[in-house]
Image (spheres, rainbow, N blue to C red):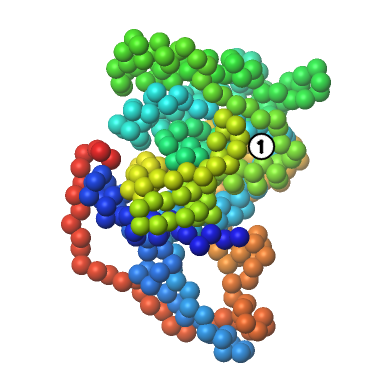
Amino acid sequence: MRTPYELAQVIKRFGSGFDELHHPNGYAQRILRAIRSCRTVALGWHKDRCDDCGHIRISYNSCRNRHCPKCQNIQRKIWIAERTEDLLPVPYFHVVFTVPDKLNRFFLQDSALMYNLLFKAVWGTLSQFFLTRMNGDGGMIAILHTWGQNLSLHPHIHCIVPAGCIGLKGNWKPVAESESGKMYLFPVDNLSTVFRGKFMELLKPIFPIDKLLKKELFRHSWVVYVKEPFAGPESVVEYLGGYTHKIAISNHRLVHIDDQQVTFRWRDYRDNQKKLMTLTGVEFLRRFCLHILPKGFVRIRHFGILSATRKADYRELQVSMGVTPSPVNKKRTRKSWKEICREQLGYDPDLCPHCKKGRMVVIERLLPARGPPVKLSVPKTFLT
């Protein structure tokens, strides 16, 4: 059942109070305005008429912002369609790297720098294991997530890793199998130790770390989780698509909004139970804004043999495995959102919803409203 509540309602109701108390920068304000205006008259609309029965439909334009909960489904399907041709006919592992919450203050100080450092430490760890344990080059697709279920800051990276690597002679070397016949990537405890060491080594010249904090960070193992390999390449892309275009909170998780508070569903992983959490509207928006990525930041990245610089080698590997790859120099043709709707969602946006026979034809357009410029305060820090 679709929830009657949306993130846009929270922004509309509590946005002014949030601005007064926390003074978000101009970039964050623009994103909140875009989400609030998504699929409303503020962004314009187009009117369609059926060429058979004359039915009229008005469709409001989307904001297309990557932080908007209403604009991700089509983008996710487009991404899945584009990635399908890039797969190898081998098993894939899902690996998650997480840093302790005691490092959150550094992520709040310079989020772009810290997120880049996190990517670097993760790939440094996996590439070292491929080199030292398998004497080859591996690869991964990495997706940054910054949130926990309760909207707290929780930076972690989801990785999809092929179960093997390219050896020194250019041959494919699969990962080992356990005595039970199951494939395994690398020992989790060893991954955790190396990941912690690499991250701390990268962090050392950037932020001073006192002895007490360093002792706390080295007291426990950092969380690295490796799931069993997927059944096949097709399930990999569909599964990964669920992570690529996620945002901090979706509309379906919102349970209630009143004049003071917002209630939403969340999963407590300590007991794996779904629960309800209630926050003031301003606190809810403060937590949501923690997960607005820096402008232009790339949160989906390809490394090793899956990177853009290794395309020629990767195509040769695909051919050796019986896969017919697209040419290296071929420009990828991106499918339109209407094609994705028809092929992936089973919905034809041009079919008349009334008579189910005619085609909807655009007869009128309204451009987005352009108001006077608004002066925005831009403090040095993202949030106070």
The residue drawn where x is 46% and y is 15% is 197
Quadrant of res 103: top left
Q: List the single residue furthest toward the right.
A: 180
Q: Is residue 380 above or below residue 44?
A: above
The quarter in which the N terminus is drawn is bottom right
Where does label 1 land, which residue?
316
Q: Secondary structure at mark 1?
A: helix
Point out the image quarter for the C terminus: top left
Question: Does any portion of residue 145 appear in the rendered image?
Answer: no
Q: Mark 1 belongs to which amino acid?
A: Glu
Other residues around mark 1 within 10 Å, as few (<14) / some (14–19) / many (≥20): some
Residue visible at 47% across and 84% down in the picture = 363
What x and y, as percent, mark residue 207? 30, 21
The percent position of residue 123, horizontal first and vertical second, equals 51, 26
* Residue lying at 58% horizontally and 15% vertically, measured from the top left: 190
- x and y percentages locating residue 70 in the rendered image: 49, 59
Does 41 sit above or below residue 243?
A: below
Which residue is at 47% across, 55% downward? 256
